[in-house]
């Protein structure tokens, strides 16, 4: 059965089942140019049939480090499936990748981004038909997953009988489509729930999170996890076994109830601001029953609706902004690899930085003034590692290796063999200058000195050392292991090689670097503080805390400004606010409200009292209540302040471009991703001149 016949069968079955035409145009006509024509020799795949009758399809796109699905690769894959259908030697099929860290990265988002909507619909049809052809093959089919297996890369494996994965740290499995404003539409929303159950399928699809191999096995996404070198042996063994039948999952009987509860939970969490997530719940819970073709139709119709939205376009644009930052070349300098680093300070930030460095294979020396401080820092790191192990984010071996890479000392030692020193002491300029002056005598002339300050002048610190060209700011955000952004603060004299090295270093940590100039508050805090201080002013004018927070939650913020101040710590927020008020007295008027609360010992969550009261670190009561004001006016006021300050930063050249500013605010503050960032929001809504 060829591809055209397969599509016709699907269409006939769907129209018969639903007794109505699809909202998508009739595919056999629009896909004529794809289906017909003499097949060219495959450029992206190799097909080998061995003596045991196992057909090995190896995905290996030339001149690329990744494999992606697009019209060309889908056509080639379909042609190979047709070849296998007619080859009587074939007793089993194994799909694998030749890439070092990528199985299949999913659909070619760059191609989709530039396509007209009608062509996107055609591509969805094509992918569904090809993967359905794979599912209908009457020989055992094994997906041998090594490396990133995402989106359409995972959907093709759902058409196989077995999914096996390597235990390598590059193996990540998931369906992140809802983070792009769409949903899995090559069978993922239909097949996954039939394999793992509706509840697990909804969790994977609505969150869009990727899982490592161990967590994927626990969730039932893969059946076996083995070292990469044993994947072929395991695939050969499974190729000789009887194909597993589809299990009856009792929970799926209750899919309407599960879907209702899931939708209510999603709406509560997203406030209806992410249509792709609620649409995914509807499709998954309806597609779990009946013929596969019914589910595929639901997927297509949902994507046809979602892909036209501005929200999806913004989310896809944001995806590319982050991809560019994560893979950004080393500017004009030469990036050196950092193997050894020192972290000065074992507090919350110092321990967090030491942990993330060690988890990424870097040997870390953590220092502090006393053994007690170091002990508390190590206790924090052990807690982070234990939590990651419990949640199956790392293996016990990886956890042990992380801890083994960390050493400590409370006495000054030579640091001339360390490539990087990160100072993460208390936010005091006097203390930091003293530390930098001391470090200058203990490091080599090639050592990069970085400060984790959130607002203090990096230029002033650089004046205390003989090589200011090797001084930068590395502003990690708290909690370090979760927050994806790192601001890299540069000076006019910063060496190109130093900049290239720290950008590459941050990328190696799995973080997104945004390069900014040294200026009070740098970028994120500079934009955030006016928003937070205006929220405090609104509260002082009589608007209840809860109302202010609710308004910004409805805007899409993950946390209201008053709650965020409690989380940051009112003492920390007051310090940053004073720094910016001194630098920009005309635009950052100082308020006494925070000072009074700090003087009263009300520092926020860490003391149990701030704008909210807490017991056992859980919020129990807002401090004030009154009539609910109009949330829209609060949103307009606060959102306008964010966009205005972002535009000022752009005009002053604090960041390289508008994309970096939007990206930093989304990753550093949780600014609503579907709005694209404060500058994109200002441009699209016209609230200020762009």
Image (cartoon, helix red, strand yellow):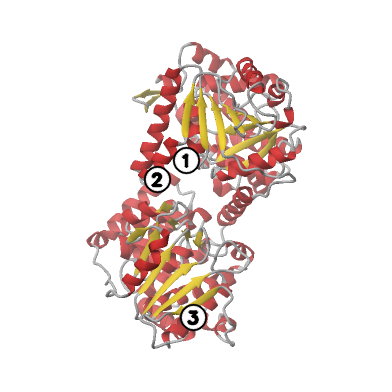
Which mark sits nearer the N-terminus, 2 or 1?
Answer: 1
Q: Residue at x 71, y 40 (%)?
A: 497
Q: Residue at x 42, y 41 (%)?
A: 401
Q: Can you identify the residue that label 1 sits on?
A: 359
Which label lies toward us, 1 or 3?
Answer: 1
Q: Identify the image quadrant of residue 139.
A: bottom left
Residue 80 seen by the camera: yes
Q: Identify the image quadrant of residue 457.
A: top right
Residue 248 in the image, given as x and y percentages of width and height: 23, 66
Near-viewer residue (571 or 357)? 357
Of all residues shown, which one is farthest toward the top?
A: 599
Q: Name the element at disc 1.
A: helix
Q: Can you identify the residue that label 2 sits on?
A: 394
Q: Quadrant of the N terminus?
A: bottom left
In the image, residue 29 sits, relative to residue 213, either above or below, namely below
In the image, residue 201 sits, relative to residue 377, either above or below, namely below
In the image, residue 251 sits, relative to residue 6, either above or below, namely above
Residue 588 in the image, given as x and y percentages of width and height: 66, 23
Are dots 2 and 1 in contact, CB under 8 Å?
A: yes
Residue 678 seen by the camera: no
C-alpha distance separating marks 2 and 3: 37 Å
Which mark sits nearer the N-terminus, 2 or 3?
Answer: 3
Residue 118 in the image, given as x and y percentages of width and height: 58, 71
Q: In this rendering, would 575 be left or right of 175?
A: right
Label 2 CA crowd tier, 10 Å (few <14, some 14–19, many 20+): many
The mark found on residue 80 in the picture is 3
In the image, residue 39 sits, relative to residue 662, either above or below, namely below
Q: Residue at x 45, y 45 (%)?
A: 271
């Amino acid at each position: 059965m060829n591809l055209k016949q397969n599509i016709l069968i699907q269409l006939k079955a769907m129209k018969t089942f639903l007794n109505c035409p699809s909202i998508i145009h009739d595919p056999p006509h629009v896909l004529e140019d794809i289906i017909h024509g003499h097949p060219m020799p495959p450029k992206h795949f190799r097909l080998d049939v061995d003596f045991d009758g196992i057909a090995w399809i190896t995905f290996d796109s030339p001149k690329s480090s990744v494999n992606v699905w697009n019209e060309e690769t889908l056509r080639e894959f379909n042609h190979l499936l047709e070849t296998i259908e007619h080859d009587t030697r074939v007793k089993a099929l194994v799909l694998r990748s030749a890439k070092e860290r990528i199985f299949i990265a999913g659909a070619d988002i760059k191609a989709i981004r530039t396509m007209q909507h009608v062509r996107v619909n055609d591509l969805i049809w094509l992918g569904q038909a090809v993967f359905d052809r794979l599912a209908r093959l009457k020989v055992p089919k094994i997906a041998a997953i090594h490396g990133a297996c995402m989106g359409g890369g995972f959907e093709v494996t759902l058409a196989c009988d077995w999914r096996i994965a390597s235990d390598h740290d590059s193996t990540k499995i998931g369906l992140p489509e809802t983070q792009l404003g769409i949903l899995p539409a090559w069978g993922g929303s239909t097949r996954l729930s039939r394999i793992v159950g509706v509840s697990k399928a909804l969790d994977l699809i609505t969150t869009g999170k990727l899982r490592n191999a161990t967590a994927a096995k626990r969730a039932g996404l893969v059946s076996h996890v083995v070292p990469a070198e044993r994947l072929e042996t395991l695939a050969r063994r499974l190729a000789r076994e009887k194909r597993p039948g589809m299990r009856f999952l009792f929970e799926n009987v209750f899919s309407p109830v599960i879907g209702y509860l899931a939708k209510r939970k999603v709406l509560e969490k997203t406030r209806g601001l992410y249509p792709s997530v609620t649409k995914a719940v509807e499709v998954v819970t309806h597609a779990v029953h009946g013929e596969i073709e019914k589910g595929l139709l639901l997927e297509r119709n949902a994507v046809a609706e979602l892909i036209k939205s501005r929200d999806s376009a913004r989310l896809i644009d944001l995806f590319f902004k982050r991809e560019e930052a994560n893979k950004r070349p080393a500017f004009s300098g030469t990036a050196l690899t950092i193997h050894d680093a020192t972290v000065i300070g074992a507090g919350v930030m110092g321990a967090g930085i030491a942990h993330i460095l060690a988890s990424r294979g870097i040997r870390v020396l953590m220092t502090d003034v006393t053994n007690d401080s170091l002990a508390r820092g190590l206790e924090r790191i052990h807690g982070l590692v234990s939590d990651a192990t419990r949640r199956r984010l790392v293996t016990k071996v990886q956890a042990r290796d992380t801890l083994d890479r960390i050493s400590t000392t409370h006495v000054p030692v030579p640091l001339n063999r360390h490539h990087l020193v990160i100072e993460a002491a208390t936010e005091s300029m006097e203390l930091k200058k003293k530390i930098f002056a001391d470090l200058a005598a203990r490091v080599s002339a090639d050592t990069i000195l970085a400060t984790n300050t959130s607002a203090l002048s990096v230029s002033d610190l650089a004046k205390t050392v003989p090589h200011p060209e090797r001084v930068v700011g590395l502003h990690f955000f708290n909690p370090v292991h979760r927050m994806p952004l790192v601001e890299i603060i540069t000076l006019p004299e910063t060496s190109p090689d130093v900049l290239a090295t720290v950008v590459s270093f941050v990328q190696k940590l799995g973080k997104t670097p945004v390069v900014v100039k040294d200026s009070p508050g740098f970028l994120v805090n500079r934009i955030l503080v006016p928003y937070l201080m205006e929220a405090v002013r609104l509260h002082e004018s009589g608007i209840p805390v809860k109302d202010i927070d609710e308004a910004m939650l409805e805007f899409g913020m993950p946390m209201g400004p008053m709650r965020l101040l409690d989380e940051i710590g009112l003492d920390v927020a007051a310090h940053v606010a004073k720094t910016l008020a001194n630098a920009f007295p005309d635009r950052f008027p100082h308020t006494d409200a925070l000072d009074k609360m700090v003087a009263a010992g009300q520092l926020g969550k860490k003391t149990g009292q701030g704008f909210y009261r807490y017991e056992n670190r859980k919020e129990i009561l807002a401090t004030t209540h009154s009539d609910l004001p109009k949330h829209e006016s609060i949103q307009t006021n606060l959102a306008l302040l964010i966009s205005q300050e972002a535009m000022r930063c752009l005009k002053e050249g604090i960041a390289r471009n508008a994309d970096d500013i939007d990206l930093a605010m989304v990753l550093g503050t949780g600014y609503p991703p579907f709005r694209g960032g404060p500058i994109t929001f200002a441009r699209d809504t016209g609230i200020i001149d762009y």
